[in-house]
């Protein structure tokens, strides 16, 4: 398979996951689908993600580009900013993240998923939070395994929303706007109510 074919197939699979995301969200909001259907939707998503990972393994290695290196540097910097912003707590469960040797450790999570995010905001502090665990364990694993619930609390952002416009709920139940400069601003009660009604209308 050449790189074009791989990229095309990954695109098709990503669209399938996005379609399944929407179905799952609809199913969770109304009694339209039975539990069995919900399980099948989640199976499809899991299978698509597995295929994308397998396709990635077959991507020919690209020569290092300046942009890629800068993006990685920005990601590292944003993770550092996120840790300080969160006071070294897992944003979702509040677990202390100082000691990485304590299970399940910690990792940087892209709210708008790395693969789908606009490269201009992908690695900025407004799109990065630190969670306990890895992509499959702890709260980081939870976010990827429960996209609909994660989306409701701002841990996953669909590609059509801007990360700056989506607040996130922390372990205390407080909601925050994550700003471009790496700081966070707590939502007022009115803003929370407004956000939740916007979310219901648009989702
Ligand atoms: Zn956690």
Image (cartoon, rainbow, N blue to C red):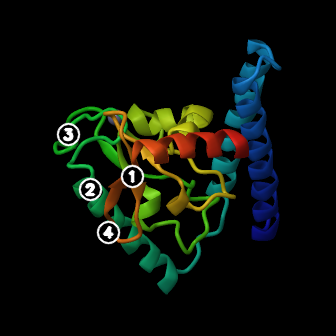
Report which quarter residue 11 is drawn in: bottom right
Q: Position of 1 compared to 155: left or right?
A: right
On residue 129, the disc is 1
For ligand 1, the image quadrant comes to top left
Q: Measure how far apart labels 2 and 1 are at the Cα level.
A: 9 Å
On residue 77, the disc is 4
**Is tag 1's residue or tag 4's residue first in the polypeptide sequence?**
4
Q: How many marks?
A: 4
Q: Give the structural element (helix, strand or loop) at label 1.
A: strand
Query: Which marked residue is nearer to the observer: mark 3 or mark 1?
Result: 1
- Could you tell me which residue is drawn at 69 percent across and 25 percent down? 28
**Is tag 3's residue or tag 4's residue first in the polypeptide sequence?**
4
Report which quarter residue 5 is drawn in: bottom right
Q: Measure how far apart labels 3 and 2 are at the Cα level.
A: 21 Å
> Which quarter of the rendering shows the C terminus?
top right
Which residue is labeled 2 in the image? 85
How crowded is the residue under tag 4: few (<14 C-alpha within 10 Å), some, or many (20+)?
some
Is the Cβ of the residue at disc 3 closer than 8 Å to that at disc 4?
no
Q: Give the structural element (helix, strand or loop) at label 3.
A: loop
How crowded is the residue under tag 3: few (<14 C-alpha within 10 Å), some, or many (20+)?
few
The one nearer the camera, 90 or 181, is 181
**Is tag 2's residue or tag 4's residue first in the polypeptide sequence?**
4
- Could you tell me which residue is drawn at 67 percent across and 34 percent down? 46
Disc 1 within 8 angstroms of ligand 1 (CB): no
How crowded is the residue under tag 2: few (<14 C-alpha within 10 Å), some, or many (20+)?
some
Which residue is labeled 3 in the image? 101
């Amino acid at each position: 398979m050449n790189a074009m074919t791989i990229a095309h197939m990954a695109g098709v699979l990503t669209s399938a996951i996005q379609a399944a995301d929407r179905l799952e969200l609809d199913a969770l909001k109304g009694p339209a689908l039975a539990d069995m259907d919900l399980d099948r939707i989640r199976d499809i998503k899991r299978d698509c993600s597995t295929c994308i990972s397998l396709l990635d393994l077959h991507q020919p290695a690209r020569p290092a580009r300046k942009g890629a290196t800068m993006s990685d540097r920005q990601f590292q910097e944003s993770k550092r900013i996120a840790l300080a912003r969160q006071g070294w707590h897992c944003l979702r469960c509040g677990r202390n993240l100082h000691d990485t040797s304590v299970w399940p450790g910690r990792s940087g999570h892209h709210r708008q998923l790395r693969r789908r995010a606009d490269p201009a905001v992908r690695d900025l502090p407004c799109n990065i939070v630190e969670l306990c665990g890895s992509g499959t364990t702890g709260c980081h694993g939870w976010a990827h395994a429960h996209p609909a619930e994660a989306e409701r609390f701002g841990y996953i952002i669909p590609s059509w929303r801007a990360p700056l416009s989506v607040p996130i709920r922390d372990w205390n139940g407080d909601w925050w706007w994550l700003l471009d400069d790496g700081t966070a601003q707590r939502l007022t009660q009115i803003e929370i109510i407004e956000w939740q009604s916007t979310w219901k209308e648009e989702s």
